[in-house]
Amino acid sequence: MILVGLAIFAFLLGSIPFGMLLARAKGVDIRTVGSGNIGATNVVRALGPKVGLAVFVLDVLKGTIPALIATQVVQDPVGGVQIQTISMLMGVIAILGHMFSPFIGFKGGKGVATGFGAALGAIPGAALVGLAVISLTVALTRYVSLGSILAAISVPIVSMLVFRDSLQLLPILVVMAAFIIWKHRANIERLRNGTESKFAFKKQIPDKEEDDGRDPPR
């Protein structure tokens, strides 16, 4: 019963659309500007780095908190499932809540920040490598989507080969990476076509009263 309750908590916590809520507090419907995504990258473009960073931290915590709680409330393996695996599963449930939030019509973000948070709570070594991968990729190319995809691919590899985490995690991490890549399918097409927007850590979408008539970057 504890795990069922924790799973429900993880999903509901993951479902909170912080990007939409913080943008709405600024008078902006984030779903109607830029890419329309509720994640930190689009929030930075629409509202600037301070609000975007707040969204990123909150989205990370959505994954970290359930994963860490699981390590505290679960003292022994359950049905052969190890504690580290249970921790990661709770994080994954939060990711699903983020991607398919019932509060916004079962739509949501792409799960990168919440996925990082889940990994940070369950497999911190691999999570930090994933963060390094996305940071380096964005620094070199300025494509957040490419960095996110490469980070999603790298986490299962380094988790298994470098940090020797539980083999039970492998199918979970592979499925998680596949979900994140699937959510980036439109970005992948734009990367192939050379039309993907590059990231700058500043506001890029003008306010309506500042609009000079040009279409906002997408």
Image (spheres, helix red, strand yellow):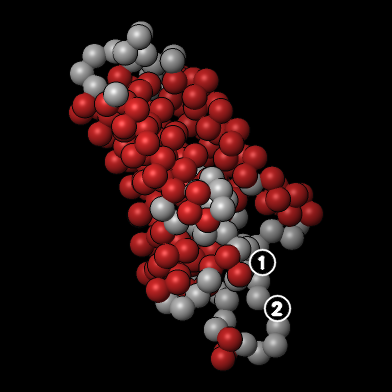
- Classify residue 47 as left or right of residue 188: left
Say which amino acid is labelled 1.
Arg
Q: Position of residue 114 (x, y in %)?
A: 43, 45
Residue located at (58% from left, 86% from top):
208
Say which amino acid is labelled 2.
Asp
Residue located at (41% from left, 40% from top):
11
Q: Position of residue 58 (x, y in %)?
A: 35, 54
51 is higher (above) or lower (below) than 83: below
80 is higher (above) or lower (below) than 11: above
Instruction: Pick the quarter of the image with the C terminus.
Output: bottom right
- Classify residue 30 as left or right of residue 17: right
Q: As rendered, which of 73 and 1 lies closer to the eye?
A: 1
Q: Is residue 209 visible?
A: yes
Quadrant of res 127? top left
- The residue that mark 2 highlights is 215
Residue located at (24% from left, 14% from top):
76
191 is higher (above) or lower (below) than 216: above
Which secondary structure, mark 2? loop
- The residue that mark 1 highlights is 218
Q: As rendered, which of 29 and 118 lies closer to the eye?
A: 29
Residue located at (60% from left, 63% from top):
36
- Classify residue 183 as left or right of residue 71: right
Cα gap from disc 1 to disc 2, whole angstroms: 9 Å
Instruction: Pick the quarter of the image with the N terminus.
Output: top left
Q: Position of residue 101 (x, y in %)?
A: 50, 48
Which secondary structure, mark 1? loop
Circles 1, 2 touching at the beta carbon (< 8 Å):
yes
Disc 2: CA contacts within 10 A as few (<14), some (14-19) or many (>=20): few
Q: Position of residue 217 (x, y in %)?
A: 65, 71
